[in-house]
Structures are given as structure tokens and as C-alpha cells.
């Protein structure tokens, strides 16, 4: 274990870092240097072979071409002369040189053990390429004795570039690689020496760094135990010296902070005592440990300390656990001699690092007046509900059509006037229903259920908006399952739901789009009606609040189109009053589908609900 702790010390880590840096640097330099030396030696070796091959090609060209040689020249005049020249003038250590005629037959060779090759054809690929007047012919091979060799073949040309033969050289590269091995050994030795010196210097340097750190560590441990009189020597103006100065300044500030902390506690107690909101704090077990005077007044109790916070606030079960551990808020209704009043209780869990939730702070705010204002707002909105806009728009559209010339066509004019009359009467009913709907929250308005034909319901809903859809070129489709017939429901209320949904679909569907009304029976005693459009859709972040009152996805656009943010919330209240549910599914730029499901059993004969 002591050996493991040794390798965890800063001193050993610094030494290892220095050694690794030198090792990596030497390896990078070595790779580059050895690679460069190898390339240089290889190029020099290859160049020498090529020069020999070119010189021999020039000397052998007349002989291979069958020309008479000047006696005063140094060029051989026969095959025997070529053999003499190859064996004596062009002898290369551990290399064989062959002179071949234009058919690839060996005329002369420098290797005495290969004299039997004379007269035989050399079928090497390099020779074949050379006889085809290709000059750049070289390759490296490893023979049966595992010796790496270099092969060069050069064409022999004469007068006009005619190929009259070739020179073939096979040379061993052992000397080159022996040289490289010696270079590698020298470099490894240098690397080991450099690593040894680096290790020694690293030990000395790490010692000068870690000793002051050890002193600081001992002093910090003393401060952690509560001894704030610790001071360390500042040995220089480097980083460690500045760290020592910072440590001394820290201990001084800690001493000052302790005295300030006591003063702040007194101030906090004074603030809590005089806050207009109530504050109650509990420990991790949920027991109250701190409360102020305002909290006692709001909760109408004499003391809070030692009580269970959840019980004090009238909470129980999973709700209490969730609020105490995760935070949140809830409304608390209290009754006293002055009547009912409302408290908003906001829970904030207290977290401590590595220990999770160690307590909860509950802030109590009297929101009775705020709730009264909110109630007044709901009543006001109910009186000016935007649901009046749909019949008014229909009346105006048909009136404009009459003004544009439909009045001259008696049959069409009668139909338009009839629609206007029906919409006017329906508008009167809607006003009454909206006032009635304003009391839905308190369940004070009963539904007027009657036998209703669902196909007729949807067809009439589509017909009411026929003019608006035709103006935008929107196609309206109605699909009704065979199982859907007459059901028992509040016709006016469901008309209002459909009007809201279709109106929204028209507003947010581009020209040339489609709106689909459909009805089906997911269960025997249930009716599901859907309104689907191909409009601009709703962002996912808004889907969770789309049914909230006064909520608009795009406030500016909604106001321009006449929306108040109440249409979907009114539809939800009507569906809930029927005992049903309403859901919305939407994809941005793909469309929206709103489906409401009602408990609507079929009607038996006699007009009574099944």
C-alpha cells in the first residue's frame, strides 16, 4: 500500500512527466532522423546502381548492335569482351551484373557461379520492361537466404533509340541495413543516457516544488480543525509563493468571517421576524425547526417548532413527499372568523453537497386578493367570449354575398337569408350558453341533452364554414363510421366545440389545405369526434399548455385573427361537462388533430338514452 501511495505523490508524478516528455521527444526525433538517414542511404545506393547501369549500357551498346568497334576505344568488341568488362570494371560487392541481348538472353555475368546462365533467357519482369524501352525499372526482393536485394534493369539503346539489349543488376542491401542498425544502437544509447539525466534532474526539481506544498497541506489541515491562527512562510514570488500569501490571507479572512457570521445570524433573525410573508423551515425528517411570527399568524397556530411540516400544512401521502423533496407550490385554503382566505405555499428543498436534501423551506404568501381578481377576470372574459365571432363572421359572409349579386337570384338569396336568420338565432343561443358556461367551474349549469344525429351534426358544422373554406380554397371532408348514429348529448354545446375547433383549423391552415371531420365509436358507449387540419401545427413546447385559459402560441398572430386564447379551454370545459376527454396532437408545419371523446350511448326507440 505504501508503494501505491508513493506513486500518487506529486513528486513522483512530476518525475514521470519529465521522463515521459523526454522519451516522447526522443522517439519523435529518432523516427524522423532514422527515416531521413534510411531514405538518404537508399537513394544513394539506388543512384549508384543506376549510374553503373547507364555507363555499362553506353559501353555495351555498339557490341550488342553488332557494329565494328574502333580499336582505340575502351568499348568491348565481343561477348568475351563484355564478360571481361562486367567481371573487372563493374564488379560491385555482393552484386551480380548481367548484359542481355534484345531477346533477353544473358551474354555476360559478373557472378562466376552463374556462368551457366550465359545463353539462357532472363524472364524477370524488370528485364521485360527494359527491353520495351522502359527505363524506370527497379524493385526490392528478399531471396531464399532472407537477404533483401535491389533489382535495376536499364535498356541498352543504339542510334535512334533502338533497343539492342539490357543491363540487369541485382545488388544486396545488407551493408545499407547494417549501417542503419549501427545508427539505431547509437540513438538508443543516447536516449537511455538522456532519460537517466532527466530522472535525476526531475527528482531535484520536484523536491523544490513539493516541500512547500507539504507545508501548506499541514497548515490547511490545521485550519480544517478550527485553528485559524496558521501562517506559512512565503519563500518566493513564484506561484507557490503567491499560494502561500493567499493561504495566509484566507486564514485572516476566515477569522473575520466567523465574527461576521454571528452578526448575520442576528440580522437574519430580525428579517424573518419582520417579513410580510411567512417562513417555515424543516429538517431532513420533515420536522419544523424555524418559523417566523407571520407564519404563525397565517397558519393560526401558537407554535410550529417540533411539528411535522406536512401535517401543519394539511398535506399527506405522495403529494407531501413530492413537494418536500422536489419543491413546487400548492394552494392552501384556510377559514377563520373573517371568512375563507387562500395561501400559496412555495416549497424549496435545501441541498447539501454529497448529502442530498437536508431540509425544506416553505414560504407562505396570502393570495386571497389575487384570487379574487382572477375570478373577476374569468367572469369578465365569459361575458365577452370570442365564441360570438364565428356566427358573426358567417352572417357577414352571407350578407356580403347577397350584396355582391346573390340577392338577384331568388332561390340563392332565400337560402342565404335563411342561413343568416339561423346564425342570428344561434348567436343568441351562444350568448346565453356562454354566460351559462362561465359557471361551469362551480358545476352550476346542467347540460341540455337531446337526441342528436352525429352525421347531421358534422355535415351542418362543415356547411356553416363552407364560405370561409371556399375563400381560402380549403377542402373539407367528412368521414363517419357506419356504427355512428344518433346519440344523447347537448347539441348546442357540441356545436360550440366544433365551431371553435373548425374556426381554429381554418385560421391556421394555408390556402389549398384540407380539413377532415370524422366520427367513430372506439367503444360501444363512447363517441370520438376528430377535427384534423393540414395547417402550420403547434410547437411541442406549447402542447402542454394549449388548453390553458388565455394561452396563445403566437400572441401577435392570435390577436390579429381575433383569438382571445379561450376557444380550446371553453371546448375542454364543455367536453368535461359531458364526462368526456379532449386531446390534441400536432406536428409543426404538418398539421393538428383535436379529438374529443364523449360517453354517448345510442338512442333506443322512444327518444330515451340507451
Image: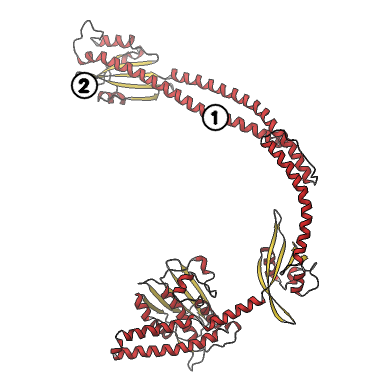
Please name the residue shown 50% across and 20% down the image. 183
Report which quarter residue 317 is drawn in: bottom right
Label 1 element class:
helix
- Is 85 in front, or is 462? 462
Residue 267, by quadrant, is: bottom right
Q: Secondary structure at mark 2?
A: loop
- In percent of width and height, residue 460 lies at 40, 85
Q: In the image, residue 230 lies at what x, y percent?
A: 78, 41
Left or right for 118, reference 298: left
* Mark sitting earlier along the chain (2/1): 1
**Which residue corresponds to the image point at 47% horizontal and 92% vertical from the top-left?**
605
The vertical placement of 280 against 251, above or below, is: below
Q: Nearer the viewer, residue 587 or 450?
A: 587
Q: CA distance from mark 2 to mark 1?
A: 53 Å
The residue closer to the viewer here, 522 or 379, is: 379
Q: Is residue 596 visible?
A: yes
Colour mapping:
secondary structure
The circle drawn on residue 25 is 1
Residue 286 visible? The answer is no
Q: Is residue 13 left or right of residue 165?
A: right
Say above or below: 37 vs 577: above
Q: Which residue is mark 2?
A: 161
Using the image, determine if residue 79 lies above or below residue 260: above
Mark 2 near mark 1, Cβ–Cβ under 8 Å?
A: no
| Circle 1 crowding by C-alpha within 10 Å: few under 14, some 14–19, many from 20 | few
Direction top: furthest residue: 72
Q: Quadrant of residue 265?
A: bottom right
Q: Identify the residue shown where x is 23% and y is 9%.
A: 77
Amino acid at each position: 500500500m505504501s508503494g501505491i501511495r508513493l506513486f500518487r505523490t506529486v513528486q513522483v508524478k512530476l518525475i514521470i512527466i519529465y521522463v515521459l516528455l523526454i522519451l516522447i521527444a526522443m522517439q519523435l526525433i529518432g523516427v524522423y532522423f532514422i527515416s531521413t538517414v534510411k531514405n538518404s542511404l537508399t537513394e544513394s545506393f539506388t543512384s549508384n546502381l543506376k549510374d553503373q547501369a547507364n555507363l555499362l549500357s553506353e559501353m555495351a551498346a555498339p557490341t550488342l548492335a553488332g557494329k565494328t568497334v574502333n580499336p582505340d576505344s575502351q568499348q568491348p568488341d565481343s561477348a568475351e569482351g563484355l564478360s571481361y568488362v562486367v567481371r573487372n570494371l563493374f564488379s560491385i560487392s555482393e552484386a551480380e551484373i548481367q548484359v542481355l541481348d534484345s531477346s533477353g538472353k544473358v551474354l555476360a555475368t559478373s557472378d562466376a557461379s552463374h556462368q551457366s546462365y550465359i545463353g539462357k533467357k532472363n524472364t524477370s519482369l524488370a528485364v521485360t520492361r527494359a527491353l520495351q524501352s522502359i527505363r524506370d525499372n527497379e524493385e526490392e526482393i528478399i531471396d531464399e537466404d532472407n537477404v533483401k536485394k535491389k533489382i535495376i534493369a536499364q535498356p541498352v539503346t543504339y542510334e535512334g533509340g533502338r533497343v539492342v539489349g539490357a543491363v540487369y543488376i541485382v545488388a544486396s542491401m545488407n551493408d545499407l541495413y547494417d549501417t542503419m542498425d549501427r545508427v539505431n544502437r547509437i540513438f538508443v544509447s543516447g536516449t537511455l543516457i538522456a532519460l537517466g539525466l532527466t530522472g535525476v534532474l526531475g527528482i531535484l526539481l520536484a523536491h523544490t516544488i513539493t516541500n512547500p506544498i507539504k507545508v501548506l497541506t499541514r497548515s490547511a489541515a490545521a485550519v480544517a480543525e478550527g485553528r485559524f491562527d496558521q501562517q506559512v512562510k512565503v519563500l518566493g514570488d513564484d506561484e507557490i509563493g503567491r499560494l502561500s500569501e493567499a493561504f495566509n490571507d484566507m486564514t485572516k479572512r476566515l477569522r473575520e468571517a466567523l465574527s461576521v457570521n454571528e452578526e448575520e445570524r442576528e440580522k437574519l433573525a430580525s428579517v424573518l421576524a419582520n417579513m410580510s410573508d411567512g417562513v417555515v423551515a424543516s429538517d431532513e425528517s420533515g420536522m419544523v425547526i424555524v418559523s417566523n411570527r407571520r407564519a404563525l399568524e397565517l397558519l393560526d397556530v401558537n407554535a410550529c417548532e417540533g411539528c411535522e411540516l406536512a401535517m401543519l400544512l394539511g398535506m399527506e401521502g405522495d403529494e407531501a413527499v413530492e413537494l418536500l423533496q422536489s419543491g413546487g407550490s400548492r394552494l392552501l385554503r384556510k377559514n377563520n372568523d373573517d371568512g375563507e382566505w387562500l395561501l400559496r405555499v412555495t416549497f424549496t428543498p435545501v441541498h447539501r453537497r454529497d448529502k442530498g436534501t437536508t431540509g425544506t423551506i416553505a414560504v407562505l404568501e396570502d393570495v386571497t386578493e389575487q384570487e379574487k381578481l382572477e375570478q373577476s377576470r374569468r367572469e369578465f372574459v365569459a361575458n365577452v367570449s370570442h365564441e360570438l365571432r364565428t356566427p358573426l363572421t358567417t352572417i357577414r359572409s352571407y350578407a356580403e354575398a347577397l350584396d355582391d349579386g346573390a340577392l338577384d337570384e331568388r332561390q340563392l338569396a332565400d337560402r342565404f337569408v335563411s342561413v343568416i336568420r339561423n346564425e342570428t338565432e344561434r348567436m343568441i343561443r351562444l350568448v346565453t350558453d356562454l354566460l351559462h358556461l362561465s359557471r361551469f367551474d362551480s358545476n352550476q349549469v346542467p347540460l341540455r341533452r337531446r337526441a342528436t344525429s352525429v352525421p347531421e351534426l358534422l355535415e351542418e358544422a362543415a356547411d356553416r364554414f363552407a364560405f370561409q373554406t371556399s375563400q381560402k380554397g380549403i377542402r373539407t371532408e367528412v368521414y363517419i363510421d357506419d356504427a355512428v348514429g344518433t346519440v344523447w348529448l347537448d347539441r348546442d354545446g357540441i356545436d360550440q366545440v366544433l365551431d371553435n375547433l373548425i374556426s381554429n383549423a381554418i385560421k391556421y391552415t394555408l390556402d389549398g389545405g384540407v380539413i377532415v371531420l370524422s366520427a367513430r365509436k372506439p367503444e360501444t358507449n363512447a363517441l370520438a369526434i376528430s377535427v384534423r387540419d393540414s395547417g402550420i401545427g403547434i410547437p411541442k413546447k406549447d402542447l402542454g399548455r394549449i388548453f390553458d385559459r388565455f394561452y396563445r402560441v403566437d400572441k401577435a398572430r392570435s390577436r390579429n385573427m381575433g383569438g382571445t386564447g379561450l376557444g380550446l379551454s371553453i371546448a375542454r370545459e364543455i367536453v368535461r361537462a359531458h364526462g368526456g376527454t379532449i386531446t390534441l396532437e400536432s406536428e409543426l408545419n404538418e398539421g393538428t388533430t383535436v379529438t374529443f371523446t364523449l360517453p354517448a350511448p345510442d338512442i333506443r326507440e322512444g327518444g330515451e338514452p340507451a
